[in-house]
Amino acid sequence: MARPMLIAGNWKMNGTRAEAADFLSKLRGLKPDARPGRQLLICPPATLIGEMAKPLAASGVLVGGQNCHPGVNGAFTGDISAGMLRDLGSSHVILGHSERRAMHGETDQLVHVKAMAARRHGLIPIICVGETLAQREDGQAEAVVREQVRTSVPDGIEGDALVVAYEPVWAIGTGRAATLDDIATMHHIIREALAGKSDGAACGLIIYGGSVKPNNAAEILSLDLVGGALIGGASLDAGDFMAIADAT
Ligand code: PGA
């Protein structure tokens, strides 16, 4: 059986309705084929999830959010709940991206409760972990990532309902992806850290993010423990996104 692969696009704060329409029409033209085990996912800004859900589904692509609030509803101005994302048709939600950790002060504990909220509403959390350049240079990368997995990932999530994304902060948006050795080593460490939590989580998908492009996707995605990619910049272009997906 083909091994499961998740190719996920993180649009961040990019995309107007016109740009989304353009992306969708290019994607339609590329006719993504349904490959066994491969899931394609686009996480646009929340403003576009509703209108992209159906056309993406018609191309066999899932839609997801980039963040959610841990609560159900209430006086949380500007926030969006997991249930609301689900209501728009989302299957996944990215949580604890390093940009949210750095710019919005998100802690492992907050990511943990957000992930539980996501599961309560039937969403698959994509929990991001990864060291900064300073932490790597200080020899702390493995310890940092182990601790992030230990604290951010709730116990007992079934393996097929959990994705952990290894995203070294210094590789995001820099054009400098981690080396294959570093990616393989860190995926192994994450696998171990998940196995230490519960049997279920041990089966969760681990994906790599950080400057994944059409020209480096094949070698990254061919690594044994790599279960897919989280793609920022290159996912804004339907051609690049599909070139990466087809490198699986
Ligand atoms: P990048 O972003 O592909 O633009 O490096 C990855 C991410 O932040 O998820």
Image (cartoon, rainbow, N blue to C red):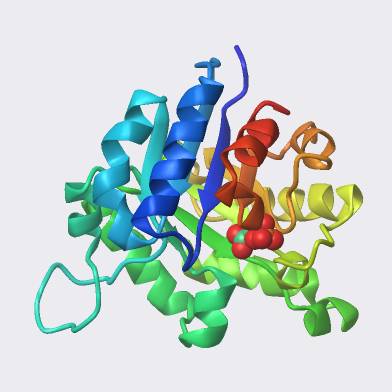
User: Horizontal and vertical percent for residue 121?
Assistant: 21, 51
Q: Which of 227 and 57 is in front in this view?
A: 57
Q: Is residue 177 above or below residue 72?
A: above
Q: In which quarter of the image is the C terminus?
A: top right
What residue sits 60% from the left and 54% below the top? Answer: 165
Which quarter of the rendered image does ligand 1 occupy?
Answer: bottom right
Q: Quadrant of the N terminus?
A: top right
User: Horizontal and vertical percent for residue 12?
Assistant: 50, 64
User: Horizontal and vertical percent for residue 34?
Assistant: 50, 16
Report the side of 208 relative to 46 (left or right): right
Q: Which of 1 and 247 is in front in this view?
A: 247
Q: Is residue 40 above or below residue 63?
A: above
Q: Quadrant of residue 35?
A: top right
What residue sits 50% from the left and 77% below the top? Answer: 100
Residue 157 visible (yes or no): no
Report the side of 199 relative to 86 (left or right): right
Q: Nearer the viewer, residue 219 or 200?
A: 219
What residue sits 67% from the left and 26% below the top? Answer: 246
Count of numbered marks: 0
Residue 128 visible (yes or no): yes
Q: Which of 127 and 150 is in front in this view?
A: 127
What residue sits 57% from the left and 39% below the top? Answer: 238
Report the side of 59 relative to 34 (left or right): left
Q: In which quarter of the image is residue 6?
A: top right
User: Horizontal and vertical percent for residue 198?
Assistant: 49, 49
